[in-house]
Image (cartoon, rainbow, N blue to C red):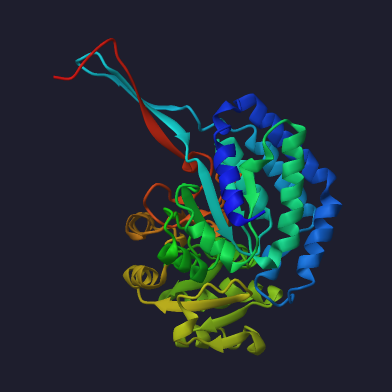
Amino acid sequence: MTTQEQFYKIKEAARSMPSIDKETTNKVLLAIAQSVKNATEDILNANRKDLDRMSPDDPKYDRLLLNKERIDGIATDIENTTKLPSPIGQILSERTLENGLLIKKVSVALGVVGVIYEARPNVTLDVFVLCLKSGNACVLKGSSDAMYSNKAITKLICKTLSDMNINPDIIQLLDPDREATNALMNAVGFVDVLIPRGSQNLINSVREKSKIPVIETGAGIVHTYFDKYGDLEKGKNIVFNAKTRRVSVCNALDCLIVHKDRLTDLPALVNQLQDKEVTIYADESAYKAIQNTYPESLLEKANIESFGTEFLSHKISIKTVDNLKDALDHIYKYSSKHSEAIVSENENNINTFYSIVDAAAIYCNTSTAFTDGAQFGLGAEIGISTQKLHARGPMALEELTSYKWLISGDGQIRD
């Protein structure tokens, strides 16, 4: 089947989405969750084919990796999605005008959602589940890195849909080549919105070339500022968790900013990172503060490229600042507006940080690892939007809707 034929199929199939009631949707999702569990070994076999083609040293390897624990987690997220209210048909506002017209603003699906993503096969399931629950059809364009995994997962979804008497054409997986990417970016009249999920280069390319409206899910250049008034015990745990929980995800910590008056605490603040063999790129002040306590093989002096970099690996930079303003200036200069954090016991500094920092998610005294749809109680997510139009932060069910106006009268005509 050609890419263009796939576009025609999904455009036609999307017309059937409003007729799928909420009860049926949840039954289908539960069936898919069970199918995922039942097909764990098949999915892992396909995933191993993909992993065999990638070096374990590649930062994308962890994103590509599936195991039983991760698959069980995906299935659980699908089941949890059935417990969430449908975002479709919600009355967002309602009023009666002086002329008697009743006007309602009601949530509706976006239509056909296109997603371009890199080596993350879990996204195939996340996107489909969220789209089905929010009444959308989806066109998926994964990378060649996850080709076998994505095909296995899509085949499983289509079989389950057919078994449940739902048109399987509501999901289309495009070929993992550039031609398909270009076709998707030009699918005017077939795809309503396009969401790139991956590296900054991918996002920039889609934003610049797409003729379809784009919602950006930006790269995460993430900072945590350890304030003059930060609690050391909290800080140690937060920094370790934010950096090492999963280094390849967009909410992982990239740069630790430390107040100059707390440099004496810096060894204790970062010492645990060596257990995970995290390489530190430290500015001059920070380097002097930890050079006798942190392994020499894991410590380097920072350069201009150490800041404003999304490492996606066991690497972190450290920037020393004189005050809160300097920390805010550093974040302003290098932030990707994804997730930023402050560790402080000073209420004024916390409120200033909340007020001044421009990011989708801003944290106080906790780890940036929580920037995640499931962690926010939203179910799975389609990505973390770093833009300000339509959606910002974890894009879950509500963010996959638009609205329309319903106007009811009794014979009124306009003067």
Q: Is residue 143 left or right of residue 333?
A: right
Vertical side of 319 occupied by 224: above or below: above
Q: Is residue 245 visible?
A: no
Image coords of residue 197 (percent x, y): 54, 60
Q: Is residue 167 visible?
A: yes
Q: How many marks do you count on the picture?
A: 0
313 or 357, which is in the foreground?
A: 313
Which residue does the image show at 67% across and 43% down from the upper left?
Answer: 77
Q: Is residue 360 left or right of residue 153?
A: left
Q: Quadrant of residue 118?
A: bottom right
Which residue does the image show at 43% across and 63% down from the upper left?
Answer: 207
Image coords of residue 405 (percent x, y): 35, 28
87 or 157, which is in the foreground?
A: 157
Image coords of residue 275 (percent x, y): 70, 74
Q: Quadrant of residue 148?
A: bottom right
16 or 254, which is in the foreground?
A: 16
Vertical side of 403 occupied by 265: above or below: below
Q: Residue furthest top?
A: 410
Quarter of the picture holding the C terminus:
top left
Image coords of residue 412 (percent x, y): 23, 13
Q: Residue furthest left?
A: 415
Vertical side of 90 occupied by 248: above or below: below
Q: Is residue 195 left or right of residue 6?
A: left
Which residue does the image show at 70% across and 33% down from the upper left?
Answer: 28
120 or 307, which is in the foreground?
A: 120
